[in-house]
Image: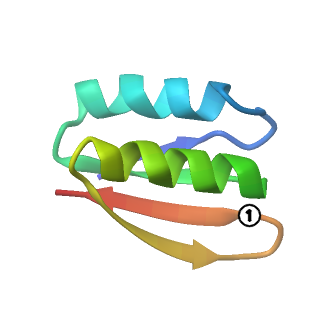
Amino acid sequence: MKTLDTSGYSCPEPVIMTKKALKESPEGLTVIVDNRASRENVTRYAMAVGYNVETEEGRGCWTLKISK
């Protein structure tokens, strides 16, 4: 599964990057975000287009595992 690190980017950039990456890897991907707004927005987007999202919290970041 592909990993996309969006650390350092503010919304809406992480959502745009996730949308593009899911077109390239429709089976799913792992997204790393470093702020709450990005975590919420990427999760909301992925769920709206039919993906499941598992969230793991780490030191100053979240790992979102997006899958069908």
Specify few, some or many for label 1: CA neighbours under 10 Å numbering under 14, 14-19, or 20 or more. Answer: some
Q: Is residue 18 left or right of residue 6?
A: left
The location of residue 41, given as percent across then percent down, is 58, 46
The residue shown at (46%, 34%) is 18
Q: Is residue 40 left or right of residue 11?
A: left
Q: How is the image coloured?
A: rainbow
Query: Which quarter shows the C terminus?
Result: bottom left
Q: Relative to 34, say whether 21 is above or below.
A: above
Q: How many numbered circles are shown? A: 1
The location of residue 2, given as percent across then percent down, is 35, 45
The residue shown at (67%, 46%) is 38
The residue shown at (18%, 37%) is 26
Q: Is residue 42 visible?
A: yes
The location of residue 8, given as percent across then percent down, is 81, 38
Front in this rendered view, residue 48 or 11 = 48
Q: In this view, does 65 lie to the left or right of 13?
A: left
Q: Relative to 12, say whether 39 is above or below.
A: below
Q: Is residue 34 visible?
A: no
For label 1, the SS is loop
Front in this rendered view, residue 12 or 31 = 12
What's under tag 1, amino acid-wise?
Cys
The residue shown at (78%, 53%) is 35
The residue at which mark 1 appears reads as 61
The location of residue 28, given as percent across then percent down, is 26, 49
Q: Relative to 16, say whether 9 is above or below.
A: below
